[in-house]
Image (spheres, grey):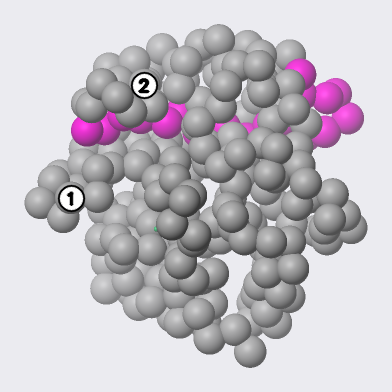
Amino acid sequence: MHDALRETLHTLHNAAARAQRPVPRLLAVSKTHPATAVAALGAAWRGLEPGVRPAFGENYVQEAAQKQAELAGADFEWHLIGHLQSNKAREAARLFDWVQTVDRPRLVEALSRHRVAAAPPLNVLVQVNIDDEASKHGCMPDAVEALADAIRAQPRLRLRGLMAIPAPDPATRGRAFQRMQALFSALQARHPGVDTLSMGMSDDFAEAVGAGATLVRIGSALFGARPASSPPRG
Ligand SMILES: *Cc1c(COP(=O)(O)O)cnc(C)c1O
């Protein structure tokens, strides 16, 4: 019924078996794709994996708000995977189940303050700038510990782990994945509740699984190519 989804799940299971690791969670990255496509993928996913709660990733708060309104009543999990501006923290804390792109102390406090009391704590990942490129988002690796401690101190946030978007260069990304794996182990030693390492996209997720990814973010392999005008990476 949804060949791309079936193939992606198959590849994911194979990669996990080869790496002798648990099958990672799949996050379907739906940015630029309409609510109808999200609904269709969600239905197919429930058909293939009964009991699953389909999870979708969006890069922009406004786009997610509109899609969620169109999909009102659908029981999906929503992850923010794009850069979050501080002035959007309030809306993000209301709309998402997870924010994967926490990379500075100011966001920590704002997200916790705006998470409504009736909702469960907001799941958050620390986004790490693993390639040390000054132009990109994410905190430096040596800042992870302090940021994680700050998250743990907030009652309305739940620290779940780390996220990274390595440079798409096959020559360097293997090392980037391995550095993330090491950072993740260190974080787990300090905070035993931490369980999520988010890395790997359509072109490299099998390699990320080999390096211990527990959640992969896959867009084009599931939904097809995005319009050329959209930003390709976070
Ligand atoms: C767009 C995006 C993805 C998905 O990329 P694909 O190559 O389409 O699988 C994953 N993570 C982030 C942060 C993104 O912005």
Magenta-tinted stretch: 114-131
Picture quadrant where residue 16 is located: bottom left
Query: Where is residue 128, by image quadrant?
Result: top left
Q: Is residue 183 above or below residue 166?
A: above
Note whether residue 197 is visible: no
Q: Callout 1, which amino acid?
A: Asp
Mark 1 vs mark 2, foreground winner is: 1
- Numbered label attached to residue 139: 2
Determine the residue positioned at 22% across, 33% down: 131
Q: Residues within 10 Å of mark 2 (few under 14, many from 20)?
A: many
Q: Position of residue 98 (x, y in %)?
A: 63, 39
Instruction: Residue 101: say if magenta.
Output: no
As rendered, which of 231 and 144 lies closer to the eye? 231
Residue at image position (52%, 37%) is: 82
- Neighbour tally class for label 1: few under 14, some 14-19, many 20 plus, Cα within 10 Å: few
Q: x and y percent of residue 193 in the render?
A: 52, 35
Q: Secondary structure at mark 1?
A: loop
Q: Amino acid at mark 2?
A: Cys
In the picture as drawn, the residue positioned furthest to the front comes out as 229
Q: Which residue is mark 1?
A: 169
Tally of marks? 2
Look at the image and tell me in which quarter the C terminus lies. Answer: top left
Magenta stretch encompasses residue 122? yes
Q: CA distance from mark 1 to mark 2?
A: 20 Å
Task: Say whether disc 1 or disc 2 marks the residue closer to the N-terminus.
Answer: 2
Q: Is residue 65 visible?
A: yes
